[in-house]
Image (spheres, rainbow, N blue to C red):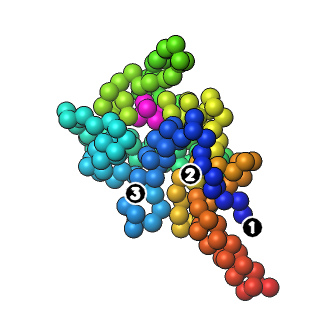
Amino acid sequence: MEPIAAEACPPSLCESSDLILSFVNTRDVDSGPPGPPGNRAGLAEWLARVGRPDRDLVVTNADTVAADELRSTFVTIFRAHAGCADSDTSVSEAEAYLHRIAERYPLTAKISSDGCTLVPAQTGVPGAFGALFAAAADLAGRGGWSRLKVCKNPTCHTGFFDKTRNSSGLYCSTACGSQMSMRAYRSRRKNG
């Protein structure tokens, strides 16, 4: 049976992973695999949902395109984390894109007696995208970046935080794992 990610995520990683996954998993529930926020209203809704409301915030079509590109890039990286069969070229291109785009959304260190965190240097939509990069840096620093994955069920592709002890989770839920096990069983019976 394939490993399923089922335990609670470690508290120190939850906030960062939740922010990134809320962005990666923006979609209409009935529309199949996760898609981009889709339009300006969808992106504005996501911004409000993750605590970045701003009455004067103007979301442009360019912001929506940037969100789509960033989300697709995260999905490519998370598919690689899950061991999906993406080409090395697409992963390399995704990494190069993240390096380039990170320059548009600078971070600054917020230092206090409790420690140091990275925060966006901008507000509005650029600040929200910067917050995604800050969350990615936080996860990487805590060893959690490679635990962000995309479900290997081809009808799902939902992003999830792999909570298995050995980071072997392949599916976002037991339902997806069971569905894939049944498909494999039926395929073996049909061919064997």
Q: Residue furthest right?
A: 192
Kindly identify the residue that appears in the image at 60 percent across and 49 percent down: 8
SS state under label 3 = loop
Label 2: few (<14), some (14–19) or many (≥20) C-alpha neighbours in 10 Å: many
Residue position for label 2: 160
Kindly identify the residue that appears in the image at 30 percent across and 47 percent down: 45
Pick whichever of labels 2 and 1 is earlier in the sequence.
Answer: 1
Disc 3 to disc 1, C-alpha distance: 29 Å
What label sits on residue 1 in the rendered view? 1
Residue position for label 3: 27
> Where residue 94 appears, x then y in whole percent?
55, 41
Q: Is residue 172 magenta?
A: no
Image depth: mark 3 or mark 2 in front: 2
SS state under label 1 = loop
> Where residue 106 appears, x then y in whole percent?
44, 23
> Where residue 46 appears, x then y in whole percent?
34, 46
Image depth: mark 3 or mark 1 in front: 1
The one of 84 and 135 positioned closer to us in this rendering:
135
Tell whether 34 sits left or right of 174: left
User: Which amino acid type is shown beneath numbered disc 2?
Assistant: Phe
Pick whichever of labels 3 and 2 is earlier in the sequence.
Answer: 3
Q: Is residue 93 visible?
A: no
Question: In the rendered view, would you say 66 is above or below 191?
Answer: above
The one of 165 and 138 positioned closer to us in this rendering:
165
Q: Specify the segment rendered in magenta.
A: 129-133
